[in-house]
Image (cartoon, grey):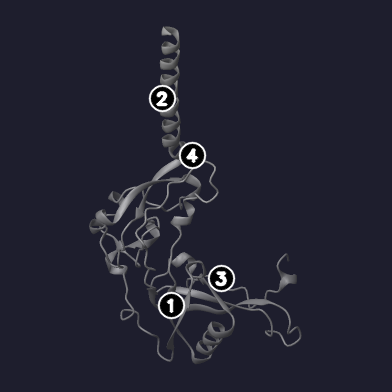
């Protein structure tokens, strides 16, 4: 009888130890999963930061977070100390890493009213997703190249062919506005689990929300932009005034590998 009690007690003790070990393993799984991806500490935006906000006022709007090195942009900031005296160039939204590209000197910050429209040009606006706007890293006063892609009809000789062309060069950006962030339910983001294909922190590192761009162009180019916004697709490049122009070239499928 006594031996059975001892055996039963031992079994119960082993069961308790087993539960504790399983719990400890589960608690450490997320940390081990991140550690296996060479984590680095970066500053993430946790609350909206309007354009023009000084770095010194961002302390309560950012938080340090570990991300896999492969998911961290090269210009991501690890501390605010090295950026003292700068301001946000554009509106910063929660979920994106704080990168040096988005911080500029106060005197460099321009609003739509600060950029003078050259004589003879007119302003026109169009809306694009961040990946079509150099990752959303444009500020007023910069110049862009405007690519227009059409599924068909661009070439009279080949009306059924897809085409892309850098149609308008070195266009002056006079204003950049970010669409309001979609409402959230304030639910906490689930922690990544080991082996989970949906736990990639890169998903939260991307900019969100569409961007409304206003540019200064001629009347003819304004018509091209409006048409492309209505019936085609637009992509932008950051094209400074000294960027090379190698002549107009329409890209088709047969041109891609040349």
Q: Is residue 249 left or right of residue 169?
A: right
Q: Name the mark nearer the viewer: 3 or 4.
A: 4
Residue that mark 4 sits on = 33
Q: Mark 3: give few (<14), some (14-19) or many (20+) Cα within 10 Å.
A: few
Residue that mark 2 sits on = 16
* The one of 85 and 33 positioned closer to us in this rendering: 33
Choose top left, top right, bottom left or bottom right for residue 8. top left
Residue 9 location in percent, x, y? 41, 16
What numbered label is drawn on residue 213?
1
The first of marks 4 and 1 along the sequence is 4
Q: Name the mark nearer the viewer: 4 or 1.
A: 4
Q: Is residue 84 left or right of residue 190?
A: left
Residue 200 location in percent, x, y? 50, 50
Pointers 3 and 4 in contact (CB under 8 A)?
A: no
Q: Residue at x 47, y 68 (%)?
A: 130
Q: Mark 4: give few (<14), some (14-19) or many (20+) Cα within 10 Å.
A: some
Quarter containing the C terminus: bottom right
Q: For the residues marked 2 and 1, what is the alpha-carbon distance in whole angstroms?
A: 62 Å
What numbered label is drawn on residue 244?
3
Q: Mark 1: give few (<14), some (14-19) or many (20+) Cα within 10 Å.
A: many
Residue 211 location in percent, x, y? 43, 73
Q: For the residues marked 2 and 4, what is the alpha-carbon distance in whole angstroms?
A: 26 Å
* The one of 237 and 51 positioned closer to us in this rendering: 51
Choose top left, top right, bottom left or bottom right for residue 58. bottom left
Q: Name the mark nearer the viewer: 2 or 3.
A: 2
Q: Residue at x 72, y 79 (%)?
A: 161
The first of marks 2 and 3 along the sequence is 2
The first of marks 3 and 1 along the sequence is 1
């Amino acid at each position: 009888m006594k031996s059975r009690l001892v055996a039963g007690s031992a079994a119960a003790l082993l069961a308790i130890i087993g539960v504790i070990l399983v719990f400890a393993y589960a608690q450490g799984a997320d940390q081990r999963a991140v550690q296996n991806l060479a984590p680095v500490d970066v500053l993430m935006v946790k609350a909206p930061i309007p354009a023009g906000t000084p770095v010194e006022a961002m302390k309560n709007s950012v938080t340090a977070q570990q991300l896999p090195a492969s998911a961290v942009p090269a210009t991501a900031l690890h501390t605010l100390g090295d950026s003292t005296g700068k301001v946000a160039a554009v509106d910063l939204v929660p979920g994106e890493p704080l990168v040096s590209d988005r911080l500029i000197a106060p005197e460099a910050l321009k609003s739509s009213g600060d950029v003078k429209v050259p004589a003879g040009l007119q302003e026109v606006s169009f809306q694009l997703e961040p990946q079509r706007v150099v990752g959303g890293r444009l500020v007023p006063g910069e110049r862009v190249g405007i690519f227009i892609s059409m599924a068909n009809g661009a070439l009279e000789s080949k009306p059924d062919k897809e085409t892309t062309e850098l149609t308008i060069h070195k266009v002056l950006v006079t204003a950049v506005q970010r669409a309001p962030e979609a409402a959230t339910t304030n639910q906490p983001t689930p922690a990544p689990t080991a082996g989970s294909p949906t736990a990639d922190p890169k998903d939260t590192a991307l900019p969100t929300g569409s961007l409304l761009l206003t540019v200064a162009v001629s009347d003819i180019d304004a018509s091209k932009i409006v048409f492309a916004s209505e019936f085609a697709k637009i992509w932008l490049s950051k094209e400074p005034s000294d960027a090379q122009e190698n002549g107009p070239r329409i890209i088709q499928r047969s041109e891609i590998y040349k």
